[in-house]
Amino acid sequence: MTPLDDLPCAVVVTDHRGWVLRVNTELVHLVGLDAALLVGQHVEQLFPPAGRIFLQTHLLPTMLREGRINEAKMDLLSASGKRLPVLINTRRAKQSDPARFLWTLFVVQERNRFESELLAARARAETAAAAASTQHELLRVTMASIGDAVITTDAQLRVTWLNPVAERLTGWLADEADGLPVEQVFRIVHEQSRVVAPNPAVRCLQTGEVTGLADQTVLVSRHGREYGIQDSAAPIRHEDGTVLGAVLVFHDVSEQRRISGEMTWRATHDVLTNLFNRAEFEIRLRHVLRLAHEESSEHALLYIDLDQFKLVNDACGHAVGDHLLQQVSQLLNSVVRASDTLARLGGDEFAVILEYCELDQAIRVAQNICDHMDGFRFMHEERRFRVGASIGLVPIDRHWPSVAAIQQVADTACYAAKEAGRNRVHVWSESDANLQARQFEMHWTERIERALDEGGFELFAQRIRPLERDEIGLRAEILLRMRNADGSHALPGAFLPAAERFQLASRIDRWVLRTTLTWLAALPRLEEVLSLSVNLSGQSVGDRAFHHWALALLHEASPAIRMRLCLEITETAAVTNLTDAAQFIAAVRAAGVKVALDDFGAGASSFGYLKNLPVDELKIDGQFIRGLTSDPLDDVAVRFFTEVARVRDIRTVAEFVEQACILERLKAIGVDYAQGYLIHRPEPLTCLYPMVQAVTAQ
């Protein structure tokens, strides 16, 4: 036991930054945690999230600046999650150790009881010593000098005295209030409902016990000014037990309530739009789902994603984009019912919870939003922007197992609305084939994320064979596989569409390029490898951040490694991002890396764009190779591609070579290299090095 353990209140000793140094047994009892778990933690851990913000922004700065905190009301958070209102006072330690602070935490009800009992005792002493004028005057001076407001009454609840603080808060002077009913002087109402609140002095005399005010009580002064107050009333008794009257003790907590209300508002609202935020939205969605299960009631959820918002952001800047979000928020607010929950989930995503709303009505509300958005034009300077809304609508009933399931299908339905043409509503249904396909892609997305994080990808390779000359060494294309749980491998055609749709293709490209360079650097005889080709997605080709990352990675590699690397860029990706593609190609070729234009001939303007792209190889699209010996048009096309490449001094590679007759025709045409199952079936990259040695020995 220490002296701190003898105190009737909770005590915490911290340093000047708020780190806990000691606690007493009363605090351990209140929070339900062992002292060893509390010491070394920050004092903010004793309070819920909103209280922590108030602590960091107000209490700690005040404590450091003034050396103390007086009567701050906070909620203490116990290990079980229970919140206990406490009044906090802090004082700087003695001069010998000014970096320490002593925190005392009174449970509000207990503090009020202590004060009321003290004042009641003083009042009893005043009555008993009425004849002793000196003692009587001393007691009145003492009562008048305390910091709280004090009102005393007789047994008929008529005011007998007010101290100066009570005079200031009520607007009544003691002489004016003398003899008036206490309800006339001490007028209290509930802050929200404005209903007259029960006077604690009345209940105090009825029960003979200390009585406190209800939460959110407001004192209305004589002149109409309002104060948020905390209050308690205690009976004044004669020595024989007779009740002589009551004493009211209260103090102004208006500022604390204002700050607490502001913190609560910030914790539940989006600052930019003043709508509910994601956290509050999810709380309300859980409530609605619970109603659906308990009452078998019907509700609906709208997931809203703005169309063309990125265009405004990119063209005019984020500040203008914020202004657009505020205007859209006002528009949405004007369409939904006051009882509905409208929230901004982040970025340009919004959601509406329609309580007790059947599907037909929900569809009308959603379509009404689309109609309003269709007529909305956002103006900035002299520019006009049309911004629509793609909406996914999900009925909420007792069949849904969780909030997460509802949110997932709502997001999927919203995406389906966007894909169907934007500014429209897509209603979720269990038989929706588009949503099932979307969910299937999301399943792949989860697998891709897990594979990137947990090493679930593996590099394979397929050899590329020269047709006109012999080469000593390995030439191959790197191919990606995803390992399945049963040890088999998923091919890129299964997961790459999902990767591209959900913006994961560049992350995959980074992994492939980094892993390939690491494999090359680990080879004992690098000269046995002639070329390894690595495919890049269209997202990477158009992503300048990827360009900077890739060039930095390449410059970290040795020149000998860079000269053995070839980056394959699809023709369609290069055409879509021609300027960025040309700059990137020039930069990597300057670093000594070769570049191949993949799927050549698939686009209508292949030859025109080839003039602007300095590449080293053309990989002829497989659709022209498969029918080379049976379709004269394919034969003409391949001969034409080969001749164009020869004029540009670019090597040609034929893909999907699976028949010997096609291989012989490619040799006759003059194609430089062939690739396909006839040449080599892909195998893990780790198996290639023994093959390299075998090829070299030939």
Image: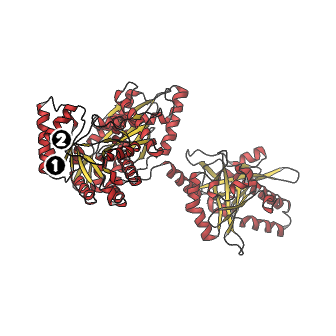
- Is tag 2's residue or tag 1's residue first in the polypeptide sequence? 2
Q: Distance from label 2 to label 1 (Cα)?
A: 10 Å
For disc 2, the marked residue is 603
Left or right: 24 as drawn, with respect to 604: right
Q: Where residue 564 sits in the image (x, y, percent)?
A: 30, 53
Left or right: 356 as drawn, with respect to 385: right
Q: Where residue 635 sits in the image (x, y, percent)?
A: 13, 35
Pick the residue in front: 688 or 247: 688
- Tell me, yes or no, if residue 351 can be seen here: yes
Residue under the point 53% across and 28% down: 293
Pick the residue in front: 2 or 155: 2
- Tell me, yes or no, if residue 354 can be seen here: no
Classify the position of the N terminus by image quarter. bottom right
Residue type pointed to by label 1: Tyr
Give me the disc on residue 609.
1
Badges 2 and 1: C-beta atoms under 8 Å apart?
yes
Classify the position of the C terminus by image quarter. top left
Relative height, residue 348 to residue 151 (above, below):
above
